[in-house]
Image: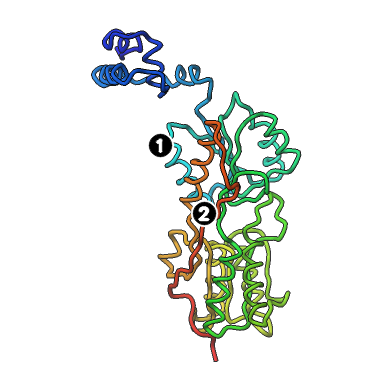
Amino acid sequence: MPATIADVARLAGVGRGTVSRVLNERPNVDPGTRERVLLAIRELDYVPSTAARRLSLRRTQTIGVVVPFLTRPSVVERLRGIELELVKAGLDMIVFNVETQERRDAILRHLPRPERVDGLILVSIAPHEDELTDIRRSGVPLVLVDAHHRSVPRVVVDDVGGGRLAARHLLDLGHVRIAFVGDPLRPPIGFSSSRLRLRGVEQELRNAGLAIPHSLVALGEHGRTRAREMALHLLGSSLPPTAIVAASDTQALGVLEAADRLSLHVPADLSVIGYDDIEAADYLDLTTIHQPLVETGSRAVQRLVRLIAGETCWPLREVLDVNLVLRGTTAPSPA
């Protein structure tokens, strides 16, 4: 029969309340007594009841994580960072996948309840003002990842800077007809990273006295298939680009497929840059912008744990750097 908290108390010569305080890492326990309790726990191989621990702490010990399009590689990597840090903190995670506006609205309306979760992480989704008011009223701490709101703690990367890095690399290689393949400027669910990356590309070209004509900006639903269709249209025009910046590695894969279908050689005929640096990018020798996906998830949990403990997170916005990863899909512009 498994050991109970009463067995631990009996062996350590203390009351059950003292054992509970040790398990919950409360400070008001004599160091010698704490050591006796921990020794008894080890000797009895005692495993505390999760349900009892939650009751004693008056918490769920669970974090709600809301993500858009769960199967996207970048989302999976962020979740990996979140899970790694939650394990260290002894917390569980419930993941809510969002692929429609209706699903997004329903989750943000019903999830933020202290009897359901101790904290909330929104990945690539920013709350509207009325939603934020309700979340704050509930008392559930909130942290954003890859999403922006001026009054909410958040962990983001320098997407504008990433777009500028991609454009600068292509300019240095002599490209002047540079296209962009990305997401709609105002996607229904609300993520903004593609728009910010395009802004960075436009800024760098403008600094060089150039611009992206509207005909070289292709925006559509995120995915490899749609990116391939958009790239086929760009490359089939009378004045095709010599280089394409994709808002994600997934979309860059679609661009590479389009080039292959048109018998264009990458990078001799066309240079391609992705964004994210997912595992497949290395396999495909794709030049890309690396963003610390796993780290954004772990940093968000660290912030949320502090908020749950009643601490403050300052500054509200934590910006992680990105960097250019040079591989084999970029080369000097064709003559």
Q: Residue at x 64, y 32 (%)?
A: 112
User: Residue 88's mark?
Assistant: 1
Tell me where residue 170 appears, x and y as whole percent. 55, 78
- Badge 2 marks a residue whose secondary structure is helix
Tell me where residue 13 appears, x and y as whole percent. 28, 8
Q: Nearer the viewer, residue 204 or 287?
A: 204
Q: Amino acid at mark 2?
A: Ser
- Furthest residue to the right? 130
- Furthest residue to the left? 43
Q: How far apart are the two marked residues, 2 and 1, measured between alpha carbons?
A: 22 Å
Q: Residue at x 59, y 61 (%)?
A: 159
| Lower position in the chain sequence, tag 2 or tag 1 | 2
Tell me where residue 46 appears, x and y as whole percent. 31, 19
- Name the quadrant containing residue 41: top left
- In the image, taking residue 31 as reference, residue 165 lies left or right, namely right
- Name the quadrant containing residue 160: bottom right
Q: Residue at x 66, y 74 (%)?
A: 233
According to the image, label 2 marks what residue? 74
Q: Is residue 242 above or below residue 11?
A: below
